[in-house]
Amino acid sequence: MDPDLTLLLQVAVLMAAAGVLVGTVAGFFGARYEVLDLAAHFRPHLAIAAAVVAVMAILVLHSPPTAGLAAVMALGNIAAMRDEFRYCVRPAAADGEGATLTIGVLNVNLRNGRHAPVEQWIRQTQPDVLVVVEASAGWIEALDRLADVYPYRALQRTTFVAMIARRPWTSLDVIAGLRPRQPMLVAKFDVGGTILTVIGAHPASPKGRRRMRVRDAEIAAIGQQAVAAAGPVAAVGDFNATPWSAPMRRLVRTTPLRYADLVATTWPTFLPRWLGIKIDHVMLGNGCTLVDYAVGPDVGSDHRPVLATVRCAPSAT
């Protein structure tokens, strides 16, 4: 091989090794330093990159120590992700008792003017309850056009979070948050005699340290609502955080909420799914089990929709 090309490959592998090392280590300090937590969102990518670097360190650098370090980084990321699988909701038994409800979430993207694909997807799938995130004023008319299918609509109760339903809620509360006009929606539904609490929320995007702290506090507030729920609960929305991040790790360890899914990515749609991250969530607790889960197609937003069919444990009599 040409010496110049060999040198270039060696430098590239060393730089990749350094990047993987920095990203992996940074992610483990996210609970203490918010900015470093950004690296934790990419643990799957870091694990794969570290494995590739380990192989390239042998083939190109002929350096077992570098390969060994990269392998440790890969295993570290895998171990961190494996821990979160303990916090997945259990699947519903095939012969389980209790009524089912399909819950969805879709961040429509406030700058997205393509209403038709979203309307078409909603009409095709018809979840019982749908939380619509970034439902700016321009989307209200589009959601109103769904009145024939969704007669129950909480629109413009908050700036960016709406909820539409095919069945009536027994109550709907707007829970004030840290940001003006950015509260949560908390609705209760009678599901076969069991009251299910559905929390719709959109924590702040992590653009800067201050917004990261606001996001973390808003995720914690979701957990407080879940803890306060008297029965089965679902928390739904674009949380702007992956399961590997510090605020989400705290959430599942201090509340009854559990992930409906950890693997299927939802953002951004312009990348292949295997390169994306998971920030749109359906989380369940207090007796909710999972019947079915799916991430939908690209409907024109930068987020993919999520659908989960859940079963609520029947109330004790």
Image (cartoon, helix red, strand yellow):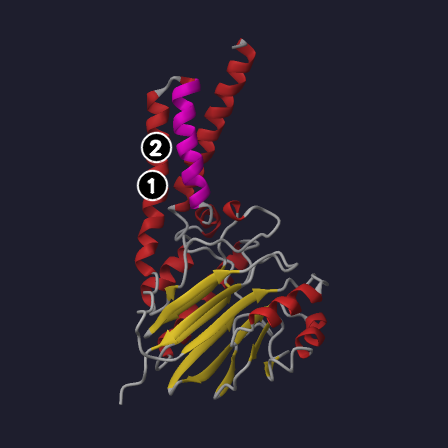
Q: How many labels does the image show?
A: 2
User: Which range of residues does the magenta coloring cover?
Assistant: 43-60
Observer-nearest of 166 and 96: 96
Q: Using the image, tell me which numbered label, if any, was put on residue 294.
A: none
For label 1, the residue is 76
Residue 201 position in % (x across, y down): 51, 70
Residue 224 position in % (x across, y down): 39, 73
Location of residue 114 with respect to 103 vertically, above or below: above
Earlier residue among tags 2 and 1 = 2
**Magenta residues: mostly which secondary structure?**
helix
Quadrant where the C terminus lies?
bottom left
Location of residue 234 with respect to 68 vertically, above or below: below
For label 2, the residue is 71
Observer-nearest of 149 and 22: 149
Mark 2: amino acid: Ala
Count residues near mark 1 (Cα–Cα under 10 Å), then give few for <14, some for 14-19, many for 20+: some
Observer-nearest of 288 and 73: 288
- Quadrant for residue 162, please give it: bottom right
Count residues near mark 2 (Cα–Cα under 10 Å), then give few for <14, some for 14-19, many for 20+: some
Residue 207 position in % (x across, y down): 57, 54
Please state if 63 lies on the left or on the right of 119 as rendered. left
